[in-house]
Amino acid sequence: MQPLFLQGPSVTLRAILLVAVSIVVMVADHRWHHLETVRGNIETYLIYPLRYTINLPSQFIQWSDESLTTRQDLLAEKHRLEEQQLRARVNLQKLSVLEKENARLREMLSAQIKVGEMVLVAEILSIDLDPYKQQVILNKGRKNEVYIGQSIIDAHGVMGQIIHLGEYSSTALLVSDPSHAIPVQVNRSGLRSTAFGTGNSQLLELRYIPHNADLKIGDQIFSSGLGGRFPPNYPVGRIVSIERPAGESFSTVLAEPVAHLDRSREVLLVWHNPPVKDVLMGEQKSVITEGEKPDAR
Amino acid sequence: MHAKSRFKVVLPTMVFALMLHMLPLPGWLTYVRPEFVTLVVMYWVLAMPEKIGVTIAWCVGLLLDVTQGAILGQHALGLVIVAYILQLEYQRIRVFSLVQQALVVFVLLLIKQIMVLWVYGLVGHAPSLQLYFLPSLIGAIIWPWVYLFLRNLRRKFSVSHDF
């Protein structure tokens, strides 16, 4: 038979203790990031199996979609992709020549040499997180040498960076999250700024822009690489509105991200080496290669 | 007293609630999703307060934090407070009608959401407020069904019928 009453004081005591523990844990996690290993382990052994299970139906739908496509459709798709690849290869040849020229010019100016980047394809699991946060879960983790702070890009531009790691999965923060900021540069005028997320996956905000800044609607913004987090010269967005309210010290500039933040399923994890001065001048590993990792990080 | 068979039911229901939280839904529905995990924890504290209490609520809250990508301890704090209130008042709440219970559930869900929102505010990234508390309302509305479903589940797997 159940006891009629619980032991009163011990419940209150336990509750107070747990509240105190919660506060300590929150501070440790948010301020000092001490608890990443704890989170990573909970994620790997307890939560990831659940995420994987929920992702299965959409994987099954994808699989059956692929299995039931007619041979004709597959052949047509194959031809289209071959053509696309051919065009990309031609552009890549030009890029390789431009990079070598760029390296020679920089050497002449005694500027730092840029080293190439390596990428790895990851898939976004179709699960939902907090709707007020712009985060996604990827199916690559510590096992694939993913690291915290690593940038992710999709076919169109910068998507975000990794903030949590599990063994087989990782959490990425998108550029549209309110707590995210990426240093950018306007392509046309060279103006440097920072693009903050707004919570809206179609809008980024460039802050602290003076009223006399050289900006036009339609200007493209790229990652500037300042801060060493994001590799430079990747597209971030396109300016869609500029407002110069008379009473404010700064303009309100809004940009639309070019990455398909809410539609992409496959993303690229980028290994980015900050420029190092004593790199050999001769061979430049400039071509983007899948799966290869840099020696030093 | 067949405690093992009881826990066989509790754990799967919590796991199922966690999975419901992660289920992909069309855009607008994600703002309306009730807090299944909180509802399930509330039922079990009500049904077995001597076994399922603040400590288990805290652990489940921590799991919810990792699931949601929140700061560790955020949802745990909210669930501890909810479980604490229930552990103090369970005798009274048990004998309420389902509608009265739903009102209590509504208040508790609001309290939890306010705690989570408060931490977000301290950190500086509070979500916009228009729809934020809607899940509490939905959660309270579906409470009678959650309660009946879990109660029938519990009765099927356990021996005692005192509650």
Image: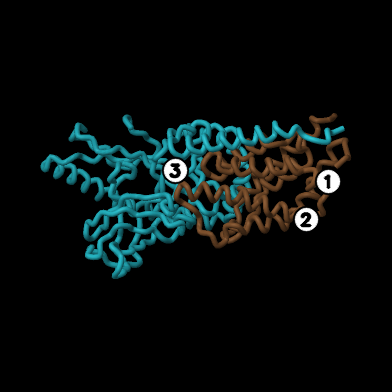
Chain colours: A cyan, B brown
| Label disc, if present, on residue B100 of the rendered structure | 2
Left or right placement of residue A174 versus residue A57 in this view? left
Q: Identify which residue is drawn at 55% across, 62% down.
A: B130
Whether residue A90 is visible here, answered yes or no, is no
The kind of residue tagged 3 is Val
Q: Which residue is mark 3?
A: A121
- The image shows residue A225 at horizontal and vertical percentages of 29, 46
Q: Quadrant of residue B27?
A: bottom right
The kind of residue tagged 1 is Asn
Marks 2 and 1 share the same chain:
yes
Q: Which residue is mark 1?
A: B152
Q: Residue furthest left?
A: A108
Q: Identify which residue is drawn at 28% across, 54% down.
A: A193
Q: Report if the CB atoms under discs 2 and 1 are less than 8 Å apart.
A: no
Which chain does the residue under circle 3 lie in?
A: A
Which chain does the residue under circle 1 lie in?
A: B
Whether residue A235 is visible here, answered yes or no, is yes
